[in-house]
Image (spheres, rainbow, N blue to C red):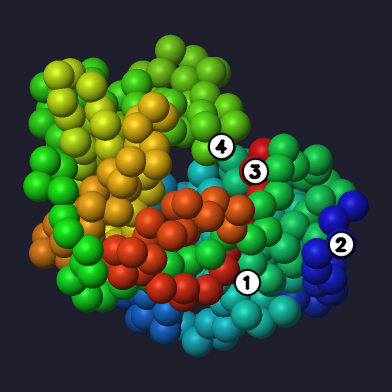
Amino acid sequence: MTTHAERPQTQGTVSALRVLGVADLPAAVEHLESDPVSNVFVASRIEAALGHSWRLGGELWGYGQGRRWSGLCYSGANLVPDASDPTALAAFAERARRRGRRCSSIVGPREQVLSLWAALEDSWGPAREVRDDQPVMAMSTDPACDVDTTVRPVREDELDILLPACIDMFTEEVGVSPIASGDGSLYRARVRELVLAGRALARIENGRVLFKAEIGSVSSRASQVQGVWVRPELRGQGLAAPGMATVVRYARERFAPTVSLYVNGYNGPARRAYERVGFSRHGTFATVLF
């Protein structure tokens, strides 16, 4: 049993929860603007759904009266809360418990995630891993260090060069291969989507990826970098900070003024590299992996 957070009370909380519809989405975007860095993933989904509702990729739950919500929660491949109100969290936990686990992770602000997990562990557990210290970092300025001019957007014809690095990074970071349960076509399609959107950057030399990163989520206010990876035999040689500086400059020019990411607290070298670029601490996430 997890001891990180108190189990939220659920009695009498579900009646104020509803699944939000298309008409609710503009107000939901406004609600999330209180913290565009922490909410970039959900905001990116909602903003995409404003043009094509199917692009939401899941359900959006709201807790409150009318469109005055004390909490929102995205339920898709990930369960992502935005609810500092314990009553809203309790309602989200109750709905998630009744539906059964349909996500591969719970991710978001640490206290909210751990509170949800305290309520869900009995019915959803066990988790494969709970990561309860993931610093969220952000910057809204030009990079503080030199950029790597060889880092650039990946072309579509370089997908087969990029894909092995993406698989290696995912496996190293998450602990399981993204292609372990199938032929890899879905994961390949996701990476290709990022390439076509101009959101995959890499340093490629002689057919090998030396450094790469993707801009995984983009809202009108912020973007979130994911999948930062340096070829193992080249780590410690100073590729990460200049590479990330290029990614930051590119993301701010093309997508949104603020660039964010989150990193495992124990990954000291990565945190120091991001600090050299100009990132500073914004908050703390937690992730429950299944």
Q: CA distance from mark 1 to mark 2?
A: 27 Å
Of the numbered discs 4 and 3, the one sitting upstream in the chain is 4
Q: CA distance from mark 3 to mark 1?
A: 25 Å
Element at label 3: strand
The residue at the point 51 percent across, 44 percent down is: 77
The front one of 288 and 266 is: 266
Q: Quadrant of the C terminus?
A: top right
Asked whether disc 4 touches disc 3, contact meaning CB atoms under 8 Å apart, the reply is: yes
The residue at the point 52 percent across, 32 percent down is: 172
**Residue 174 numbered mark, or none:** 4
Check disc 1 and give the amino acid type. Answer: Leu
Q: CA distance from mark 3 to mark 2?
A: 17 Å
Q: CA distance from mark 4 to mark 2?
A: 23 Å
The residue at the point 90 percent across, 52 percent down is: 1
For residue 99, side relative to residue 213 (left or right): right
Q: CA distance from mark 4 to mark 3?
A: 8 Å
The front one of 1 and 82 is: 1
**Residue 289 numbered mark, or none:** 3
The front one of 125 and 154 is: 154
Residue 25 can be seen, yes or no? no
Check disc 2 and give the amino acid type. Answer: Thr
